[in-house]
Image: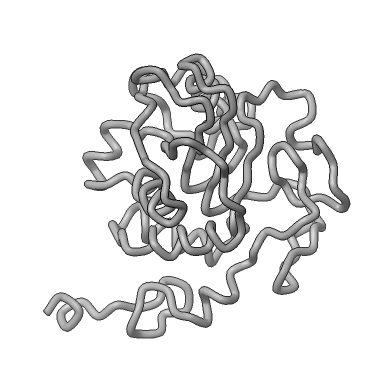
Amino acid sequence: MLDLLLPRRCLVCGAGGTQLCDGCLERLPRIEPPLCERCGAPTAWPVARCRECAGRRLAFASARAAVVYDEAVRRIVGGWKERGLRRLADDAAALVVEALPHPGAVTVTFVPPDAGRRLERGHHPAERLAEALAARWELPCAPLLARAGAARRQRGLSLAERRRNVSRAFHGTGRAPARVLLVDDVYTSGATVAAAASALRAAGARRVAVATFARALRAPGLVLQQGYRTPN
């Protein structure tokens, strides 16, 4: 009945029938090697650290994402986060599993939501993605982190402001397992997942790997699958 009253349309091309059509799903720009070994940014050749993460103290061992955060992916994430299109978490999880090897973690967890934004949305995208990934990788999923308090939105902040904004934003809810996969929807500057990974390490985790659906690229001129090129 709901589909009759509000017909579903692809968030990218507008075609009727589904929230993300097969053609647009196939054309999403995948992130392919070579990558930075630490933060997962696409690079001209394999490196241990790239310009984006060199000189930064990062609590996570590695970060990987499935797709580039371009305009099409921005529409998908917007529908997923702001319009409550929760089924998109399954599409996102399928792409992450396609792109990433099994994480070798003991437990999957997620960056916890701001309480106010969770009330606004009625769901938490990172948690939904973590649950979907855990099911596919046959791992438990547990909320190992909590917010230390309300935080400013990261959107619109400079890189330095993003890092300061979340530097003490999280704390562990108990003893963390030795190897943890930390999930979020989008990797923008890495500040949020770095702060969350630091809290997991303080709670006892020895190795934290990060997985996200999408990643914003900062280095210009990188050529990726599907002929995608970041703007110069």
Where is residue 110? Give x, y as percent. 42, 37
Q: Is residue 226 visible?
A: yes
In terms of image quadrants, where is residue 120?
top left
User: Camera-side residue: 204 or 228?
Assistant: 204
Residue beneath the point at 53% across and 48% down: 212
The C terminus: image quadrant: bottom right
Seen in the image, is 159 located left or right of residue 152? right
The N terminus: image quadrant: bottom left
Residue beneath the point at 27% across and 39% down: 118
Residue found farthest to the right: 45
Residue beneath the point at 42% across and 45% down: 139
Seen in the image, is 37 located left or right of residue 26? right
Specify the color scheme.
one colour
Q: Is residue 165 visible?
A: no
Residue beneath the point at 34% across and 20% down: 173
Where is residue 77? Give x, y as percent. 44, 57
Where is residue 183? Give x, y as percent. 47, 42
In terms of image quadrants, where is residue 91?
bottom left
